[in-house]
Image (cartoon, helix red, strand yellow):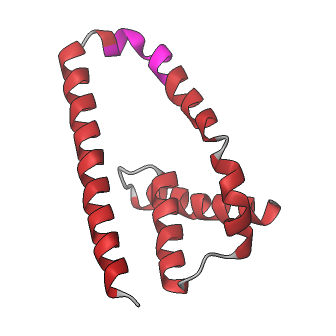
Amino acid sequence: MIETFIWLLGYQFVGEVLAHGLGLPVPGAVIGMLLLFITLLLRQEVPAALRHNVPTLMTHMSLLFIPAGVGILAFWPLLSAHPLAMAAVLVLATLSTFLITLLAMQWLSRRREVQP
């Protein structure tokens, strides 16, 4: 499990350094996970530490929503002052996530059919 955390936190650290160092408007954790994804694609295999321990971490994924909930409570006056903008952002974010997931799944399923 420690090796899994080293992988994940290492890539998050690199992502944070890149985000802050280059002044990117993207969270460092997102950059780190993208770099991890690219690394796994280039390696064409998932290291044993990740393969065995990530499913365990995913069972506790609901804990990741706690900071988002606290953020909503902390910024509630600002959020409630702009209900139309918030509704638009929620709808657009949901639709874009759905569309990107749909396109990724179509691409992956076509790719899987081509490979023996």
Q: Is residue 49 left or right of residue 75?
A: right
Q: What secondary structure is the stretch in magenta mostly built from? A: helix
Which residue is located at x 27 percent, y 29 percent? 90
Above or below residue 42? Residue 70 is above
Q: Quadrant of residue 77?
A: top left
Which residue is located at x 35 percent, y 50 percent? 25
Q: Quadrant of residue 45?
A: bottom right
Which residue is located at x 22 percent, y 31 percent? 91
Q: Position of residue 8 (x, y in %)?
A: 64, 60
Q: Is residue 108 left or right of residue 41?
A: left
Which residue is located at x 61 percent, y 75 percent? 46
In front here: 39 or 76? 39
The residue range painted magenta reads: 71-79
Above or below residue 62? Residue 36 is below
Quadrant (top left/top right/bottom left/bottom right) for the N terminus:
bottom right
Above or below residue 115? Residue 8 is above
Quadrant (top left/top right/bottom left/bottom right) for the C terminus:
bottom left
Q: Position of residue 51 (x, y in %)?
A: 67, 68
Inspect the magenta stretch and tell me whether residue 67 lies in it.
no
In front here: 101 or 82? 101
Q: Position of residue 100 (x, y in %)?
A: 27, 55
Q: Quadrant of residue 12?
A: bottom right
Inspect the magenta stretch and tell me whether residue 72 lies in it.
yes
